[in-house]
Image (cartoon, rainbow, N blue to C red):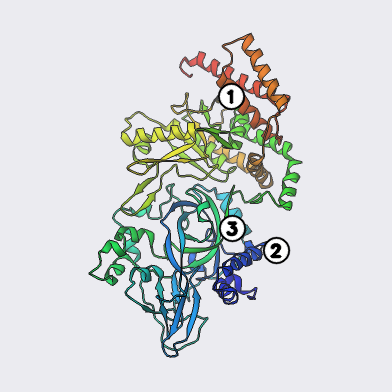
Amino acid sequence: MPCSRDWLLNPLGVVQELFAHNGPNLEWEKKVTEYFREKLKENNASKWVPSLNEVPLHYLKPNSLVRFRCMVQDMFDPELYMGVYETVDASSKSRVLHFGKYRDMAECGPRQEVDVNSAQTVTLERQTFYCVPVPGESPWVKEAYASSNQTHVCPSTSYAPSRHKRSYDDMECQPSRHKESCSGDGDFHGCGEPKRLETEAPAGQWLMSPNCSPSLDLNFPLPGEKGPACLVKVYENRDNLKVNDVLEVFGVLSVDSVPCATEERENTSPFLDAMDCADSIEEQRVHSPPASLVPRIHVLLIHKLQQINPLIPSSLQEEEKKLFVSGFMLELSSVRAELLGFLTHAFLGDSLAAEYLILHLISTVYARRDVLPLGKFSLNLSGCPRSSHFPHHLYRILQQLVPSSYNLQMTIQNMNTLRFVPRKDYTSNRLLSGLLQLASNTLLQIDETVLEEGQLDTTGVQNVTALGNLITWQKVDYDFRYHQMEFPCNINVLVTSEGRSLLPSDCQVHLKPEILPPNMEEYVSNLLTAVVPSLLNKFRIYLSLVRLLDYSISDEVTKAVEEDFVEMRKNDPQSITADDLHRILVVARLLSLSAGQTTLSRERWLRAKQLESQRKTRLQQQQCVNGNEL
């Protein structure tokens, strides 16, 4: 069996041994998956796997095992590859079987040639996903993952490719070539000076692509984002993955050169139509960028992440994870009380706004009934003073609490110039990202206080419409030119405004500060400094954990709620509507979860009614003062 010390630095060597012992039938593939799954379970071994999120690419050894925390930004068409292929020795005519999985290039010895017409050749299919770091991932999340990473790496500057290789696509495109030369790697012995058969497209060709501005080369949804983008090649369970899924992938790092578009065309017979063998040059540049800019990961194992908070277990099914949850539940009530006090200070003494913000931060879409998303709780915080830049300072606080977020300045210029909705580019055959291509449970704060006088153009109107659809229906309609494709999402939208927002919301709370600090920036800085890191981490665990709890209402409580609603309607039919009842039920559900309770009690129902009454009274008072708030 493979040596345990090799599985991190030389996973392909492990695969080679398993293939030799179990191949060429497909059983060897299951053995590979089982081997690496068991290895990563041993002694928290996944922490020893270098992460592309923290380790620069030039520090990583090619063909070593790496991991990557990412979001699926786009998915390319399936591609064929040689899962098993046969080589022939030029002198002895002996034949050897090789595996092609987890590789970009066919590899063999220096005196060997690939027999593309061999009856032993097995052609399989894999899917390539274009993956980017999770948009808006908070700095504290990055720091926590980096500090838990136990890998120690040095710059891999001595790497020099020494294999003759042939891309699988190149072989597929040129069926007239019966045999292709390629050279050996460490698994084979032979003589002869090895050399590369392909050269990689200069980085400048990728950067100067006519349909891609340099700032959007890596196609990140949010401006100013940093980090690697990767082509993630998936072999099993491809149908379970979709655009915007958040993943942690473990796989083989490939930085092999692949033929560029112009080289493909030069190698293609002039008697063949170019479209028979190669797509457009622009599409090939996008789908086969230089590995130094966009490396490739051949997936061995892949995990869908329900959440990206590094402070809580990634899965709550295992026994030790359940112990973690039950242990935290013992101090949940005290953590909630501390968080309420902290947010009350953030809202300048307004405890009602702090209560509703907690409910907003733990809300999530837990189901969909027809087109209606259940569980969403978008919040409009009105009464935010423009002069003190309050929304900016509020975002500084929220960014310290949630794993991923983005602060959208709702200026006329941003609305008219930024791309909110992803759009399909058919020239390059890729999905151009937009601001609203976000991972689930991302906090999107929209600052409406910066909105000035001006005219929205067509793009601006479309962007406002997209925001409204996101808030109301929790969906974004991606632009595929000839049609729109609906992508459901789960985004927490917080709108800060002076008066009532122009955008829809599930709940409006008018800010009523009790103190007015002379220097808001200093006030917020002192507030953040005063919170000890251990308590701040508890706030972060609390907000992520309670939203994962299940919730239900017993038949007895349901009947009591119905009777209470009928009684309230009898006393004053105008005081409560069906929409009001729905909002109270949502508030009651979130109140219960915020207290760690998974079912509704009479106490929480009454508390929800009380909060709603206070909120509506405040709005009515504000209407009396200004006359146009509601």
Identify the mark nearer the N-term, 3 or 1. Answer: 3
Residue ID at (31%, 60%) = 279
Query: Would you call the spot at circle 2 few (<14 residues within 10 Å), some (14-19), or many (20 or more)?
Result: few
Q: CA distance from mark 2 to mark 3?
A: 18 Å
Sequence-earlier tag: 1 or 2: 2
Residue 350 in view (yes/no): no
Tag 2 residue: 43
Label 1: few (<14), some (14–19) or many (≥20) C-alpha neighbours in 10 Å: few
Q: Amino acid at mark 3?
A: Ala
Residue 582's label in the rendered image is 1
Disc 3 on helix, strand or loop?
helix
Query: Is label 1 in contact with label 2 (beta carbons under 8 Å)?
Result: no
Which residue is nearer to you in this view: 347 or 307?
307
- Mark 2 and mark 3 lie on one chain; the one further toward the N terminus is 2
Residue hosting label 3: 146
Q: Residues within 10 Å of mark 3 (few under 14, many from 20)?
A: some
The answer to whether 477 appears left or right of 22 in the picture is left
Identify the residue at image location x=62%, y=58%: 147
